[in-house]
Amino acid sequence: MREQWPAQGSADYKPVGVILPNDTDIEVLEADASKLALVVLQFPKWVDGRAYSQAHILRARYRFQGEIRATGEVLVDMMPLLARSGFDAVTLRGDQDRAAAERALGFFAARGHYQGDVKVTKPVFGRAA
């Protein structure tokens, strides 16, 4: 993306974010991922899940530590998978209820998920008791 980045802490440094359409190869961010503060991934339709894969690659492969935000057709029902894929912020579609979205994040909190995800990579049977 950039030839040169200002050093963190320098007078010229400002946190940088990018908006990435879900049909863009996430590898375009590989070299610069550590310098980004925010990556906004778009869901143009709620049935198009490519942004889940983009977020997972950013977290798992590139070890991205900044904020990953979901925008577009983001529905309450998507919240658990968004969190498991690496998203930590959302802009809900206008007709969606924030309180319902917060409740949806707790649907599986007590038992967790059988499969691993970007936060807990091992499946249930591989975790220490």
Image (spheres, grey):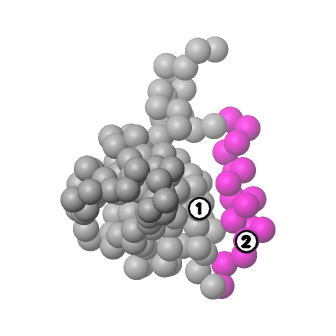
Q: Quadrant of the N terminus?
A: bottom left
Can the viewer see residue 47? Answer: no
The answer to if 96 sits in the magenta stretch is: yes
Q: Residue 96: percent from the left, percent from the top?
A: 66, 78
Secondary-structure class at tag 1: strand
Q: Amino acid at mark 1?
A: Ala
Q: CA distance from mark 2 to mark 1?
A: 12 Å
Which residue does the numbered mark 1 point to in the structure image?
A: 89
Q: Amino acid at mark 2?
A: Arg
Q: Residue at x 72, y 75 (%)?
A: 97
Name the outermost residue toward the right. Answer: 99
Q: Which residues are magenta?
A: 95-111
Secondary-structure class at tag 2: helix
Marks 2 & 1, CB-CB < 8 Å contact: no
Q: Nearer the viewer, residue 55 or 6?
A: 6
Q: Quadrant of the C terminus?
A: top right
Which residue does the numbered mark 2 point to in the structure image?
A: 98
Q: Residue 70: percent from the left, percent from the top?
A: 50, 67
How many numbered circles are shown? 2
The answer to if 128 sits in the magenta stretch is: no
Q: Residue at x 59, y 62 (%)?
A: 89
Q: Residue 65: percent from the left, percent from the top?
A: 48, 46
Q: Mark 2 against mark 1, which lies toward the viewer?
A: 1
Q: Residue 95: percent from the left, percent from the top?
A: 65, 85
Q: Quadrant of residue 105?
A: bottom right
Residue 120's place in the image compared with 20, above or below, is: above
**Crowding near the residue tagged with mark 2, few <14, some 14–19, many ≥20 C-alpha atoms within 10 Å:** some
Q: Residue at x 53, y 37 (%)?
A: 119
Can the viewer see residue 84? Answer: yes
Q: Is residue 25 left or right of residue 51?
A: left
Residue 36's place in the image compared with 74, above or below, is: above
Q: Residue at x 35, y 51 (%)?
A: 33
